[in-house]
Amino acid sequence: MVNIIWTLFIACGIIYSIFTNNVEVVNNTIMESSKTSLDMIMQIFPVLALWMGLMNIAEKSKLLDKFSNLISPVLTKLFPEVPRGHESLSYIASNIIANVFGLGSAATPFGLKAMDSLQKLNKKKDTASRSMITFLIINTSGVTLVPTTIISMRMMYKSVNPTSILLACIIGTACSTIGGIFVDRIFTKWYHH
Amino acid sequence: MWIEYLQSGIIIKYISNLIIPVIVLLIILYGIRKKVPVYDTFLEGSKDSVGMIMSLFPTFLAMILGVNILINSGFLSFLLGFFKPLFSTLNIPLEILPLAAIRPISGSASLAILNSIYDTHGPDSFVGLLASVMQGSTDTTLYVITLYFGSVGIKKIRYALWAGLCADLIGIIASIIITNILF
C-alpha cells in the first residue's frame, strides 16, 4: 500500500507540474529533498543520542517499570496481546507520559524503543502487529496537555492571550485520541473477522 | 481556577524550564541508588542511537521526496479546490482548508501555513484560534508512521494509515466544533 501511495504522490505531482508549467519548482524539490531529509535527521540525532543514554539508565534501574505501573490498568486493556510486565509496556507508558507533558523530544526515543520491543513480540517481521498500530494511533492523535510550539508561535505574533487555546486543545486532543482508539478497535474487528 | 494560572503564561514557562533538569536529575540519582554504573550505561544507550539514525535516513528521504513533490507542484492545492463549496456551505472559513489537509502529511509545511495564518489574520482572530486548536489537536500521522515503522523495518502497515487519518479527521472536526463553542 505504501508503494501505491508513494507512487501516486510523486506521479501526480510531476505530471501536474508539467501541465501547469511548474516543472522548475519540482526539479528543485527533487534535488533538495535529500538535503532536507538530512537536515531533519540531524535535528533528531542529537536528541535521540541524549535521551537514549538517559533512558538506558532509567531502564537498568527499573525506573521505567515504575512508570508503566502507574497506567498499567489502561495499558493492559489497550494492548491485550502484550504479556504483562513486558518491557514494551514501560516504554509505551513513558512515551505517553512524556507526550502528555509536552516533552516531544523525550517522547520520540521512548516511542522508538517501544516499537523495537513490540517488534520482538511480532510474528511477521515485515507486517505491523495490532499492538503496533494501536500504539501508533495514540501517538498520531497528538496527546498533549501543553502545546508549547503553538503557544510560542502565538507569542511571536503578539497574541493578547497566547495560552487562551489551552483548554480547547486539551479537549480536541482528548477527542482525537479517544476517537482514534475507537476507530482502531473497529478496524481491528474488521480485519480479524 | 488553575486554567487562569496556566493562562498567565509565567508559570508555564517556569515549569517547562524545570521539567527536563528535574527528570535528568531523577533518572541519574535513581540509577545510583539502584547501583547502576550510570556513566557506562549512558554511553551504551547513546551508542544505540547511531544505528537507529542510519536506518531512518532512507525512510525519511523517501517520505520527504514524495510529500514535497505533492505539495510544491501545486497538485494538493488543486485537489483542495474541489472541497471549497463543501466548506462554504458548512460555514467553515476557507483559509483553514490547506492546514486541515496538510496537517497529517507534513509537520513543517503545516507550521508554515499556521505562520501565514497568524501573519495575515492575527493569532486572536477566529481563523487564528481555529488554526491553533487544529494544530494542537492532531499530529503528523505520515511522519509518525514513517518514523516508527521505518525504525523497525515494517513494510506492510495494514490499516495503520487509514486508522491514523480517521483519528486526524475526528481531531479536525472536533477542533472546528470546539472553537465554535468556546470562542
Image: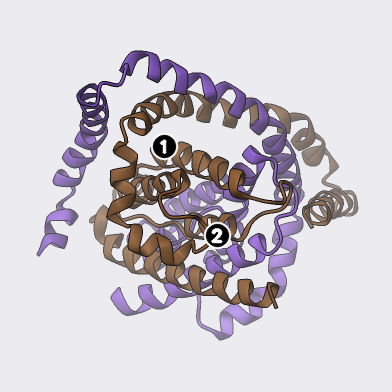
Q: Which residue is mark 1?
A: A105
Label at residue A121: none
**Residue drawn at (43%, 71%) of the image:** A178
For residue A76, side relative to residue B152 (left or right): left
Which quadrant of the view contains residue B80? bottom right
Place of residue A29 in the rendered image (x, y in percent of width and height, measured from the top left): 75, 37
Place of residue A77 in the rendered image (x, y in percent of width and height, measured from the top left): 43, 67
Q: Colour of chain B?
A: purple
For residue A11, side relative to residue A128 (left or right): right
Closer to the camera in the image, B141 or B151: B151
Marks 2/1: CA distance?
23 Å
Place of residue B1 in the rendered image (x, y in percent of width and height, measured from the top left): 9, 65
For mark 1, name the chain. A
Which quadrant of the view contains residue B98? bottom right
Place of residue B26 in the rendered image (x, y in percent of width and height, measured from the top left): 21, 31
**Residue drawn at (69%, 72%) of the image:** A191
Q: Which residue is mark 2?
A: B99
Q: In this rendering, does residue A168 appear at all?
A: yes
Q: In this rendering, does residue A155 appear at all?
A: no
| Letter of the chain shown brown in the rendering | A
For residue B170, side relative to residue A101 (left or right): right
For mark 2, name the chain. B
Identified by mark 2, the residue type is Leu
Is residue B57 shown above or below A169?
above
